[in-house]
Image: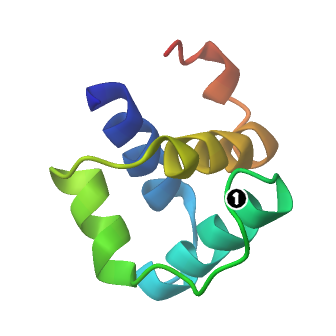
Amino acid sequence: MDQRRLVLRAYRAGFQGTPSQAASELTRLAVKSRLIRPRTDIPGQTLTNWAASGKPPLWAALAAAEWLKKHDPDFEKFHM
Protein backbone atom coordinates (compact mmCIF):
# COMPACT_ATOMS: atom_id res chain seq x y z
CA MET A 1 0.00 0.00 0.00
CA ASP A 2 2.87 2.38 0.71
CA GLN A 3 4.14 2.02 -2.85
CA ARG A 4 0.78 3.08 -4.20
CA ARG A 5 0.85 6.13 -1.98
CA LEU A 6 4.37 7.02 -3.16
CA VAL A 7 3.30 6.85 -6.80
CA LEU A 8 0.36 9.14 -6.07
CA ARG A 9 2.64 11.56 -4.22
CA ALA A 10 4.97 11.68 -7.21
CA TYR A 11 2.02 12.22 -9.54
CA ARG A 12 0.59 14.99 -7.39
CA ALA A 13 4.01 16.68 -7.13
CA GLY A 14 4.55 16.54 -10.88
CA PHE A 15 1.06 17.54 -11.99
CA GLN A 16 0.78 21.26 -12.56
CA GLY A 17 -2.71 22.10 -11.40
CA THR A 18 -5.11 22.07 -8.51
CA PRO A 19 -5.95 18.90 -6.59
CA SER A 20 -9.32 18.86 -8.37
CA GLN A 21 -7.65 19.07 -11.78
CA ALA A 22 -5.21 16.32 -10.81
CA ALA A 23 -8.06 14.11 -9.63
CA SER A 24 -9.97 14.75 -12.85
CA GLU A 25 -6.96 13.84 -14.99
CA LEU A 26 -6.32 10.72 -12.93
CA THR A 27 -9.93 9.59 -13.35
CA ARG A 28 -9.80 10.34 -17.09
CA LEU A 29 -6.62 8.28 -17.51
CA ALA A 30 -8.07 5.39 -15.52
CA VAL A 31 -11.19 5.32 -17.69
CA LYS A 32 -9.16 5.64 -20.91
CA SER A 33 -6.93 2.76 -19.81
CA ARG A 34 -9.99 0.71 -18.87
CA LEU A 35 -8.89 0.45 -15.26
CA ILE A 36 -12.32 1.67 -14.17
CA ARG A 37 -15.66 2.22 -15.82
CA PRO A 38 -16.70 5.78 -16.70
CA ARG A 39 -17.60 7.65 -13.56
CA THR A 40 -17.59 11.09 -12.06
CA ASP A 41 -14.21 12.44 -11.02
CA ILE A 42 -12.92 11.71 -7.57
CA PRO A 43 -12.76 14.78 -5.33
CA GLY A 44 -9.42 16.57 -5.18
CA GLN A 45 -9.33 16.12 -1.42
CA THR A 46 -9.62 12.36 -1.84
CA LEU A 47 -6.52 12.34 -4.04
CA THR A 48 -4.70 14.52 -1.51
CA ASN A 49 -5.67 12.15 1.31
CA TRP A 50 -4.58 9.07 -0.64
CA ALA A 51 -1.19 10.65 -1.36
CA ALA A 52 -0.70 11.72 2.26
CA SER A 53 -1.80 8.79 4.36
CA GLY A 54 -4.74 7.02 2.82
CA LYS A 55 -5.12 3.70 1.13
CA PRO A 56 -5.30 4.42 -2.58
CA PRO A 57 -6.98 1.90 -4.84
CA LEU A 58 -4.88 0.04 -7.37
CA TRP A 59 -6.53 1.79 -10.32
CA ALA A 60 -5.40 5.18 -9.01
CA ALA A 61 -1.79 4.08 -8.58
CA LEU A 62 -1.72 2.48 -12.03
CA ALA A 63 -3.18 5.58 -13.69
CA ALA A 64 -0.69 7.78 -11.83
CA ALA A 65 2.17 5.55 -12.94
CA GLU A 66 0.98 5.80 -16.53
CA TRP A 67 0.94 9.59 -16.31
CA LEU A 68 4.41 9.65 -14.71
CA LYS A 69 5.86 7.45 -17.47
CA LYS A 70 4.77 10.04 -20.01
CA HIS A 71 5.69 13.18 -18.07
CA ASP A 72 8.62 12.35 -15.78
CA PRO A 73 11.84 11.19 -17.48
CA ASP A 74 13.18 9.90 -14.15
CA PHE A 75 10.16 7.73 -13.39
CA GLU A 76 11.62 4.65 -15.10
CA LYS A 77 14.33 4.67 -12.40
CA PHE A 78 11.64 4.28 -9.74
CA HIS A 79 11.08 0.63 -8.83
CA MET A 80 7.81 -0.37 -7.26
Residue at 52% over, 52% down:
60
Q: Position of residue 71 (x, y in %)?
A: 75, 49
Which residue corresponds to the image point at 37% horizontal and 67% vertical from the top-left? 47
Image quadrant in which you'd find residue 73: top right
SS of the residue at dot 1? helix
Nearer to the camera, 43 or 72 = 43
The correct choice, above or below, for 15 with respect to 62 in the image is: below
Numbered disc total: 1
Above or below, comparing residue 71 to residue 1 in the picture? below
Q: Residue at x 73, y 76 (%)?
A: 38
> Which amino acid, mark 1?
Ala
Q: Is residue 70 left or right of residue 62?
A: right
Quadrant, the N terminus: top left
Q: Residue furthest left?
A: 53
The residue that appears at 40% across and 35% down in the rendered structure is: 4
| Residue 17 appears left or right of 6 | right
In this rendering, the answer to whether 69 lies above or below 34 is above
Would you place residue 47 above or below residue 11 in this image? below
Report whether 15 appears left or right of 36: left
Q: Which residue is mark 1?
A: 30
Place of residue 27 in the rendered image (x, y in percent of width and height, measured from the top left): 63, 70
Crowd around label 1: few <14 · some 14–19 · many ≥20 (10 Å): many
Looking at this view, name the residue that lies furthest to the front.
37
Q: Position of residue 31 (x, y in %)?
A: 76, 65
Q: Position of residue 45 (x, y in %)?
A: 29, 79
Nearer to me, 37 or 55: 37
